Image (cartoon, rainbow, N blue to C red):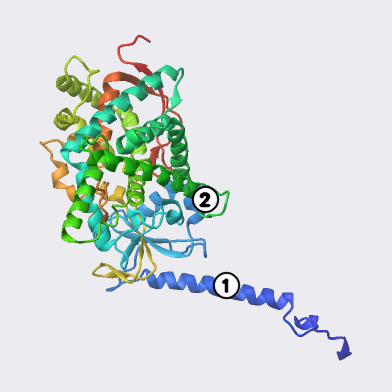
Amino acid sequence: MNITSFSAEDAGSSPWGLPGAATLLAAGSTAAIGYCMWEQIKFRMYRAGKNGYQMPGPDFVVPVAGGIVAMVKDAYGFWEKQRLFSPTGMSWHSIVGVFTIFVTDAEISRHVFNHNSADTLLMQLHPSAKNILGERNIAFLHGPDHKAMRKSFLALFTRRALGVYVRLQDKIVQTHLSEWMSAHKTPEEIRDRIRDLNQYTSQEVFAGPYLDNPEERQKFSVAYRTMTDAFLALPVCLPGTDVWKGQQGRLYIIKILTKAAARSKARMAAGEEPVCLLDFWTVQVLAEIKEADEQGLPHPFYSANDKMADSVMDFLFASQDASSASLVWAVTLMSEHPEVLARVREEQERFRGADLGAPITGEQLNEMKYTRQCVREILRYRPPAPMVPMAAQKPFKMTEDYTAPAGTMIIPSCWAASMQGYKDPDAFDPDRFGPERAEDVKFASNFLVFGHGPHYCVGKEYAMNHLAVFLARIATSLEWKRVRSGESDKTIYLPTLYPGDSVFGLKWRNQKA
């Protein structure tokens, strides 16, 4: 045997004594296999609780990636399969290697919402949310600052303020319905039309009189759209990416709204009447500034023009996708349930009289009991924002038998909660909220459409009024017929819940075919 022919390469090393490709490949493969095995063992440990509790979920997950591929391909199908692991409890999965708990029990979901804070459960909107919305967005505030700002917001949703908004909402809906009909020729997908209506409504109600420069208004609308689109993009914030464009859109919106806040302060200080949400808040902020001056205290942190602009931008963002989805569901469900639509129309004629073209008032809207039952049922049946991810900052006790480890992603399902307790919950039935059955009272704690706890939606009444005004107006103005397809009965995430399609033929009521 010629031992001199045995080279360094044969031993898996380089001539210089460094590991060769084969050795590195073997070591890398061993490490990868070891990590995958450790990950599976870790998840098995994480899902175990006291008294023999073992959280339901998959017995095996794809290493590292977990369920992310399946979720991206079919988000609704993925989460529905996840729900079925435990329809009224908790189940686990891995999302890109993160141990994730999906909560389908209403009581546990409320418990999770109640502990939304910086040091316990931190809300996770999107990996790029802070780039898109900004670091000081109210969604990221906690503690005294958050409480102080929410207290100041109460002035935005008084009965008087909501009445002003209703008049604006109704006028905008009428205008857009006329625009729809002037352009409508054949059955069309109405999702984008409703999104545009909702976007214009939010801008006009929140800051309308100060968006009076047509060129700025157009740029503002484009910037607004890029912000919402950024949430559907890859979480990469580099020049030219969708997230970067969303960030630039926010900066432009803040610039315009900062000028709007200054103009609003000047008008309100001069004693003029509030005509939009920004005005109502300005009145409150000026009163708080005056009180601080009298007591020798600093002005509220949110009273500067740019800080007010940041909050109004947050209202604009929060009102967009969720409300757009609910408006689409309103049209879709009324088409699928003509007997419900007939009762809405009967109520409208009873309360609004012969002149159905007259403006709808806040007082009338409050008396439309059945229409408001429909609004509540639309939201229960298909909550626009079906889940709210939160990251555990430390071990979090979910139940007596289970504590989630630090780093766990905990996702309470508002949709699953809205299906618990109610009679025949899979049926669309506005009568459940009538005085005879009073399921809105019996199961109020399961109606988590607007969240729960410290981040409960302050704009709940505004959102419900918007949906009620739209339903009241479209029911008495148009006839519509759905063009069904193989996608019609599906539900999709965009990222809020939408029907699989919403293609309709429209015509004015009482108009001959």
> Which numbered tag is attached to residue 117?
none
SS of the residue under disc 1: helix
The residue type indicated by label 1 comes to: Ile
SS of the residue under disc 2: helix
Question: Which residue is the extreme one toward the left?
Answer: 436
Label 2, label 1: how many angstroms apart (C-alpha)?
37 Å
- Residue 102 quadrant: bottom left
User: Where does the C terminus fall, quadrant-wise?
Assistant: top left
Mark 1 packing: few (<14 Cα in 10 Å), some, or many (20+)?
few
Q: Position of residue 54 (x, y in %)?
A: 34, 68
User: Where does the N terminus fall, quadrant-wise?
Assistant: bottom right
Q: Position of residue 324 (x, y in %)?
A: 36, 37
Asked if residue 494 is positioned above or below residue 183 in the image, the reply reads below
Which residue is under mark 1? 33
Nearest to the observer: residue 338 or residue 378 = 378
Which residue is under mark 2? 244
Nearest to the observer: residue 513 or residue 352 = 352
Q: Position of residue 129 (x, y in %)?
A: 43, 54
Nearest to the observer: residue 269 or residue 419 = 269
* In front: label 2 or label 1: 2
